[in-house]
Amino acid sequence: MSIVKDITVLAVTRMHGGVCTAGIDDAGEWVRPVRPTVERQWEQNFITDFCLLPIDFFHGGKSHLINLAVTRFRLLEPVPKPPHSEDWIIDLTAKPQLIRKLSLEEQAGFLAAHADSDLSVLDPNGNRSLALVRPQQFSFSFGLNRTGEDVTVRATFTVAGRTTSDVGCTDLRMRAIGRKLIEKSKSAKGCSLTSEDFERRGKQATYLAVGLSRLYKSKHWPIIIGVHALPELEVEIDYARL
């Protein structure tokens, strides 16, 4: 029997050909819906096992994963594997359903209420891999990947006086913004956006959802999985081009 959870989505990101999503449920707990892992003769998961596919959440002509909106998930069971204690297996027989988008006032209240004071909760040896913070400063740099066919996004940000530098950002909206900026600048050197740029564009506050990656090169790396400005970033996502 599946368990129903209404989750306010704080991350819709690219993950190796699919999408990773996460958010906070009505009990105030982080939840990361994942596909069931493939059973193999050897005890090893591939990183691609954990992502959702567009067919899982795109139906009725629209995506049912939208940042700062409530989506109803049917989940089978928790599958914690420290530090990824938030993982729940999604019920593939029941597609997620978008319930409603938070109003601007609700967004501001929700983000403020669930923000962490710093990133100390993200312990690679601990039991939590997701956090929400409001940085004092931040910047995003956009460039072409090694093949020159797509964009990469890197970020530096400061929270509680501590700066985290040159981390990956997989947020789909920031990837879409990066493509537009690079196409507009027509520069192979890339371009950037800073917290000052956000303020000049009327953003009154910005929060970052930060996560720890799956094990890669013997380490769980910090990555930005959600960028939430108030008012919101209005960016159309092309799910054929994650």
Image: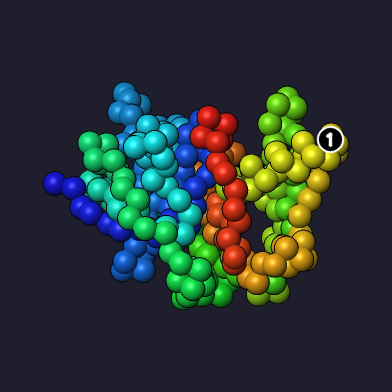
Residue 153: which quarter of the image? top right
Would you say residue 80 is visible in this rendering?
Answer: no
Q: Which residue is mark 1?
A: 186
Q: Position of residue 56 (x, y in %)?
A: 35, 36
Q: Measuring 81% from the left and 46% from the top, which residue is drawn there?
A: 191
Residue 31: which quarter of the image? bottom left
* Count of picture labels: 1
Q: Measuring 35% from the left and 51% from the top, which residue is drawn there?
A: 98
Left or right: 21 in relation to 189: left
- Amino acid carrying mark 1 in the image: Lys
Q: Secondary structure at mark 1?
A: loop
Position of the C terminus, as image quadrant, is top right
Q: Position of residue 51 (x, y in %)?
A: 43, 38
Left or right: 63 in relation to 116: left
Query: Relative to 66, does residue 19 appear above or below in the rendering?
Result: above
Would you say residue 1 is visible in this rendering?
Answer: yes
Q: Position of residue 217 (x, y in %)?
A: 59, 39
Q: Position of residue 122 (x, y in %)?
A: 52, 62
- Which colour scheme appears in the figure? rainbow
Left or right: 125 in relation to 144: left
Q: Residues within 10 Å of mark 1 (few under 14, many from 20)?
A: few
Q: Measuring 70% from the left and 67% from the top, which residue is drawn there?
A: 202
Query: Relative to 168, does residue 105 appear above or below in the rendering?
Result: below
Q: Measuring 34% from the left and 62% from the top, which residue is drawn there?
A: 25
State the residue in front, 230 or 167. Answer: 230
